[in-house]
């Protein structure tokens, strides 16, 4: 027997309403949870290995049909076949509601569980901040379009990006994934990213679209002391400059561009007109501002684990506590109700659909309220064409993902995004010189020069280093966040100063936060920043095969003290920055 919702000739709205009327409330509730699916050899493996979580198969059989793939496979075929196997489990359930598989960014260099994955089999590009350094809407859209093609080929139909946060608090650990310090530039780039993923700015999806999720509304950067709100010690978002609206600009642009999903920040706004509770529980921020004032009609996806504590606190450390900042006193049932009342449609990182089902059956949440969210989620699935064509072509995927022209475009973006801060007439380097190098993954190819083991024997010392940072908190996840000082330790400054007395030092700095150069600005013969670039890309620019085209996406502050004295919500607010937004030399 076939049903109207299975008829591709009916309108999407007709199909949605027909299926919505047929689905039991338990299935609708399950749809409102998007949790982690491990990239494992088997769907019978735990969805998260570090605690006793259900397997992917079990989650799908429970009706959870929005899942977030964590990790990666070593081959394109494995990616595509894993997706098809997972999709078959979803389609074999009654009503055949297909799986929507989502991904965090996986087209650059950082490997940080819960935030991003390195490119692997996909084309490799700079991190988001590198795309900002290019200042080119067309290239941002080209990047997102290539991401779309590679995602669709292996089954990803939802992107947990772009990140539209503005870099106004330089100590915050998530700056590298955002869109720089200037709200107007960020607004143009976030719209381009959304268009590239979804296909256009109409707000509609199609059978080759990827749904964009813009985060972290209403802007996550104004964090007290730059501390991240994944953790209780970083829960506060502050607005000492009364500049809340500045951070809304890129989100307004994303809504105009038609983004289908919005993810609230974990933080709780302090000292504003809004209630001092986490954004996912904040009706003023979600219901009144995002949905009513800004007119967003899409899915509101709560960031991961706002309802439930994680198991194994000895392993996960400070990540264990549910991000229910300001409503910690509520139990899980009350938290679910509160978030739904605020305007949340789906809960990330959770699989406690039993809690939602209970409050529905107790009469504390109406089925009509559940229908409101389920309707949005089903509409996305129908528009993406998942009901009509749920599987991917494995052979076609192998021809699309990592295609030569995609990789070439990514490599060119890496090269072009490099930002030359200073150059004491040493760059571009000549070939055939004696080179001392640090921080390169592989030996320097012989065409560039002769390697030496001591900097004192070298014509030039090329050092690939990274911006300074400190780590706080308990557990690997917390300590993988780069917080704290933006100044290099004195021992590192002294080491490079001593080296510069014996040879010319060229510094290439991976810049995930706006660093303080200190004495490096004068001790190094040249300083060039990258935001995620391969050895090949860096060498190409240093030796003049390519020219650095990047411009600083933020100011570079003079000191930690200048950053501490600045206002966390105000751009370009540090005293006497060493380099200004937009600085970037050419050859």
Image (spheres, grey):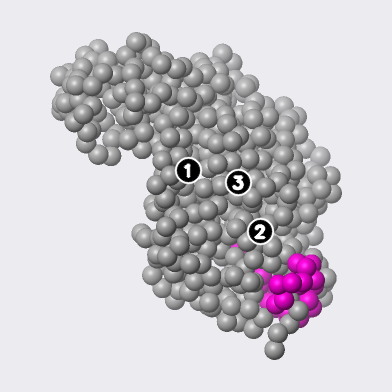
Q: CA distance from mark 3 to mark 2?
A: 13 Å
Mark number displayed over residue 206: 2
Residue 175 in the image, given as x and y percentages of width and height? 54, 36
Q: From what the image shows, is residue 296 above or below residue 380? A: above
Asked if the magenta segment contains residue 338, the reply would be no
Residue identified by numbered label 1: 481
Badge 1 density bin: few <14, some 14–19, many ≥20, Cα 10 Å = some
* Quadrant where the C terminus is found in the figure: top left
Residue 233 in the image, given as x and y percentages of width and height? 57, 44
Instruction: Give the residue displayed 20% in from the left and 25% down from the top.
Output: 449
Badge 2 density bin: few <14, some 14–19, many ≥20, Cα 10 Å = some
Segment colored magenta: 6-35
Residue 230 in the image, given as x and y percentages of width and height? 57, 49
**The quarter of the displayed image where residue 388 is located:** bottom right
Disc nearest the viewer among 3 and 1: 3
Instruction: Give the residue displayed 41% in from the left and 51% down from the top.
Output: 402
Q: Nearer the viewer, residue 354 or 572?
A: 572
- Asked if residue 541 shows in the view, the reply is yes
Q: Earlier in the sequence, mark 2 or mark 1?
A: 2
**The quarter of the displayed image where residue 164 is located:** top right
Badge 3 density bin: few <14, some 14–19, many ≥20, Cα 10 Å = many
């Amino acid at each position: 027997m076939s049903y109207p919702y299975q008829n591709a000739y009916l309108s999407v709205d007709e199909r949605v309403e027909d299926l919505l009327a047929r689905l039991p409330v338990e299935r609708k509730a399950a749809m409102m949870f998007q949790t982690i699916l491990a990239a494992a050899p088997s769907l019978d493996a735990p969805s998260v290995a570090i605690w006793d979580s259900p397997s992917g198969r079990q989650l799908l059989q429970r009706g959870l049909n929005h899942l977030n793939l964590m990790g990666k496979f070593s081959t394109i075929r494995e990616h595509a076949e894993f997706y098809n196997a997972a999709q078959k489990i979803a389609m074999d359930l009654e009503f055949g509601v297909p799986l929507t598989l989502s991904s965090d960014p996986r087209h650059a260099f950082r490997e940080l569980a819960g935030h991003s994955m390195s490119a692997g089999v996909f084309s490799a590009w700079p991190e988001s901040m590198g795309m900002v350094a290019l200042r080119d809407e067309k290239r941002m859209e080209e990047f997102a379009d290539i991401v779309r093609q590679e995602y669709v080929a292996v089954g990803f139909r939802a992107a947990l990006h772009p990140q539209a946060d503005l870099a106004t608090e330089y100590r915050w650990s998530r700056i590298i994934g955002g869109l720089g310090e200037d709200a107007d530039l960020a607004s143009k780039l976030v719209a381009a990213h959304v268009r590239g993923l979804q296909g256009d700015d109409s707000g509609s999806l199609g059978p080759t679209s990827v749904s964009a999720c813009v985060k972290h509304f209403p802007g996550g950067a104004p964090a007290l002391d730059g501390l991240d709100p994944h953790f209780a010690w970083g829960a506060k978002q502050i607005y000492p400059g009364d500049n809340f609206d500045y951070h809304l600009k890129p989100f307004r642009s994303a809504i105009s561009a038609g983004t289908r999903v919005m993810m609230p920040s974990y933080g709780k706004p302090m000292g504003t007109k809004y209630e001092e509770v986490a954004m996912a529980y904040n009706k003023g921020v979600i219901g009144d501002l995002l949905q009513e004032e800004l007119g967003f009609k899409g899915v509101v996806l709560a960031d991961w684990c706002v309802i439930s504590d994680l198991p194994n606190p000895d392993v996960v450390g400070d990540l264990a506590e549910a991000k229910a900042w300001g409503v910690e006193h509520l139990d899980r049932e009350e938290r679910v109700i509160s978030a739904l009342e605020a305007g949340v449609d789906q809960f990330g990182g959770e699989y406690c659909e039993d809690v939602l089902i209970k409050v529905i059956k107790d009469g504390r949440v109406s089925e009509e309220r559940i229908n409101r969210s389920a309707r949005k989620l089903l509409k996305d699935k129908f528009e993406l064409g998942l009901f009509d064509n749920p599987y991917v072509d494995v052979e076609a995927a192998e021809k699309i993902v990592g295609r030569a022209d995609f990789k070439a475009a990514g490599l060119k973006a890496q090269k072009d995004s490099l930002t030359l801060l200073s150059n004491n007439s040493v760059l571009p380097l000549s070939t055939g010189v004696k080179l001392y190098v640090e921080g390169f993954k592989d030996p320097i190819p012989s065409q560039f020069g002769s390697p030496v083991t001591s900097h004192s024997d070298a014509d030039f010392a090329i050092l690939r280093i990274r911006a300074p940072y400190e780590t706080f908190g308990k557990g690997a996840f917390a300590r993988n966040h780069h917080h704290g000082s933006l100044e290099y330790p004195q021992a590192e400054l002294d080491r490079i100063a001593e080296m510069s007395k014996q040879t010319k030092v060229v510094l290439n700095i991976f810049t995930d936060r706006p660093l303080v150069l200190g004495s490096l600005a004068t001790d190094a013969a040249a300083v060039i920043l990258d935001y995620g670039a391969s050895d090949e890309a860096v060498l190409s620019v240093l030796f003049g095969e390519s020219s650095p085209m990047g411009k600083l996406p933020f100011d570079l502050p003079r000191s930690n003290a200048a950053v501490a004295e600045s206002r966390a919500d105000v751009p370009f607010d540090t005293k006497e920055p060493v380099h200004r937004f937009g600085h970037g030399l050419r050859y």
